[in-house]
Image: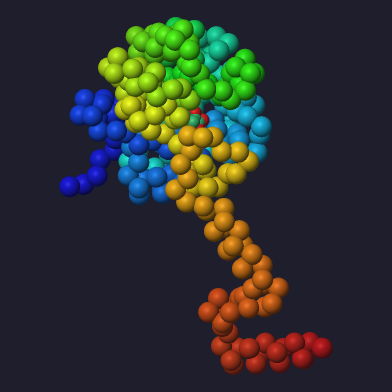
Amino acid sequence: MSRKKITILDLQQRKSEGIPLSMVTAYDYAAAIFADRAEIDIVLVGDSLGMVMLGLENTVAVTMNEMLHHGRAVSRGAKYAFLVGDMPFLSYEVTTAEAIRNAGRFLKEAGMAAVKLEGGQEAADTIRAIVNAKIPVMGHIGLTPQAVSQLGGFRVQGKTAVSAQKLLDDALALQDAGCFAIVLEAMPAPVASTISQRLRIPTIGIGAGAGCDGQVLVYHDLLGLFDRFQPRFVKQYANLSQTIVAALTAYREDVTTRRFPAEEHTYPMDAAEEAAFRERLAIGD
Ligand code: KIV
């Protein structure tokens, strides 16, 4: 059977069937190809690229142009996964018109199928307006990294009964506003599984336990490509930074000892042409 591109209907169906969704971030062409080969369901061009690709302290400074630049590379590589572009800080908060225009750029200019934005009840009107403009929206509640200053750091959310109730109310408001799915980040597992059970739409957890309808990890965390810090919820499936440093070290040693390039990496020259070349040089002398 030929492989088909994943659609928003497939995501909803997977929730009904109780088969968890896999989602990973990607920021470039190669990573998008790998995600597709691994049959990942959803690829998110996350604004986490500010930290893992651009070396920023957090996601606050990431711009629309940076997101679109990476989004275009990802959509050239991923042909089957459902593609979501992350709206950066202040690209959707200022006015509704600006939010719709910026959301639309992810579809028109970067080949995304949907956008994601952070926020609970306060973001519902904006989300409704974007959805009304025919742009699918994935919500994101709990630890919302763009609000890092307001939250006082990267902290688990919903640890008290009152704050857990607020997260449930946020999730219901986002579903009501038209979100097709919601990311639940860094919250106690019982809170996330209650939200997941109460919603019709899929939840995608990150640091939210096994009761969500899907899971997401940042590409660089999963593959061991980023070691500035590692949240408790990350499971590292490979240590590629070790592999890369070992390969680069071997390359440097080969270059300095002239083991590289070897014969097989070198273009030969016909002996007669080489002799003629040397003769020309000698005459030139
Ligand atoms: O930017 C990102 O990578 C994200 C995921 C962690 C959900 O928002």
What's the residue at 48%, 34% (across, down)?
Answer: 233
What's the residue at 63%, 88% (across, down)?
Answer: 274
- The front one of 185 and 56 is 185
Work out whether 250 lies above or below 141. Answer: below
Work out whether 1 lies above or below 167. Answer: below
- The front one of 54 and 162 is 162
* Residue 162 in the image, given as x and y percentages of width and height: 46, 7
Q: In the displayed structure, does residue 125 sit left or right of residue 52? A: left
Q: Can residue 136 be seen in this view?
A: no
* Quadrant in which the C terminus is drawn: bottom right
Q: In the displayed structure, does residue 225 sit left or right of residue 110? A: right
- The front one of 228 and 25 is 228
Work out whether 148 lies above or below 207. Answer: above
Q: In the displayed structure, does residue 44 sit left or right of residue 39? A: right
Work out whether 273 lies above or below 164. Answer: below
| Residue 135: quarter of image | top left
Q: Residue furthest left?
A: 1
What's the residue at 44%, 30% (across, down)?
Answer: 206
Q: How many labels does the image show?
A: 0
Q: Can residue 161 be seen in this view?
A: yes
What's the residue at 65%, 26% (across, down)?
Answer: 61
* Residue 146 in the image, given as x and y percentages of width and height: 58, 22
* Residue 109 in the image, given as x and y percentages of width and height: 47, 31
* Residue 31 in the image, given as x and y percentages of width and height: 46, 46
